[in-house]
Image: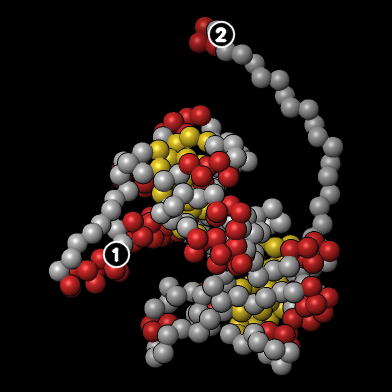
Amino acid sequence: MSFLRGVRTIPALARLPARSFSSSNMNNAKIMAKLYKGAEGAAAEEETRLLGTVENKLGMANWLKDEGHEFIVTEDKAGPNSVFQKNIADTDVLITTPFHPAYLTAELFAKAKNLKLCITAGVGSDHIDLNAANEHKVTVAEVTGSNVTSVAEHVVMSMLLLVRNFVPAHEQIERGDWNVASLAARSTLRARSSRIGQRVLKRLMPFDPKELLYFDYNELAPQAAEALGVRRVADLGDMVSNATSSPLYNCPLHEKTKGLFNKELISRMRHGAWLVKHGTRRHLRRRGRGGGARQR
């Protein structure tokens, strides 16, 4: 058996103690989806990939029916007499979309005695009182990563629109003027190096910025930071005060990121810098945004 020479025998794994699992009985569950109505006409019916519309019902209506579940789909969410609020009391699973969501407040959680699961058909939980969800032991889930590429592209597009002064530049061209800038030789920073953040940084590299900076409590792996050509800054205030262009961020909303960009932080930005925000407006303190942004 010479071919086995040098082969190491792996000892058998120790037998683990038996574990029991249990789950809620979801037979004949009541599932409600708060979706949005398609454009006027039959566009949503003709384009079945528009899954988030009330017409296409996330593509799962027939399957849920075959499984014996009740499936309610509505766009009516406003007020106590809405389809949403009338049915929330005995709903087991709630599905909603990030851009036209149903808002689940602590008051509604108290009424939703059967609610076990809230799903965002996309990403984000800004429309859900997470503290109330924890109190009532309701699981909140999303389709993490489903939009990272499109958001990263949108961020870069927004930066280019600002830097290139696109709309005013178009008006200048019509008048026969020309006054533009570029991303080259500018410092660009991010307040997070998340999935979206890393994709934004990657897409900014070909524009040859002076420096790419990021702030995050989780440090990128050295190999990833080297590949992206980025440098981590430990203090967010120091970072925004040193950047010459485009402080931008994509942060999940939680207690520590609410009002992250307030008047004090904005006041530390360099004159002429841009703030590109993609995400919930609650990352910005309304008064701080209005006062601080105008002063810059």
State the mark number for residue 184.
none
| Image location of residue 118, percent across then percent down | 69, 68
Residue at the (61%, 13%) spot, across then down:
8
Residue at the spot x=19%, y=62% of the render? 178
- The disc, 1 or 2, on the residue closer to the chain's N-terminal end is 2
Per the image, label 1 sits on a secondary structure element best described as: helix
Q: Residues within 10 Å of mark 1 (few under 14, many from 20)?
A: some
Taking 282 as reference, is 276 left or right? left
Residue visible at 46% across and 49% down in the picture: 270
Give the number of marks: 2
Relative image position of residue 161 (x, y in whole percent): 34, 61
Q: State the SS at label 2.
A: loop
Q: Is residue 252 visible?
A: no
Look at label 2 and name its amino acid: Gly
Task: Say what amino acid the circle numbered 1 marks.
Answer: Phe
Q: Residue furthest left?
A: 176
Who is closer to the viewer here, 289 or 144?
289
Q: Which residue is mark 2?
A: 6
User: Horizontally, is 150 left or right of 261 in the view?
Assistant: left
> Which residue in the structure is indicated by mark 1?
166
Quadrant (top left/top right/bottom left/bottom right) for the N terminus = top right
Q: Position of residue 286 (x, y in %)?
A: 60, 67
Above or below — where is 103 with respect to 164?
A: below
**Callout 2 crowding tier (Cα within 10 Å): few <14, some 14–19, many ≥20:** few
Residue 206 sits in quarter: top left
Looking at this view, name the residue that lies furthest to the front: 295
Q: Is residue 181 visible?
A: yes
Above or below, 223 against 47 in this view is above
Give the answer, above or below, for where 258 lies relative to 215.
Answer: below
Distance, label 1 to label 2, CA atoms, is: 67 Å
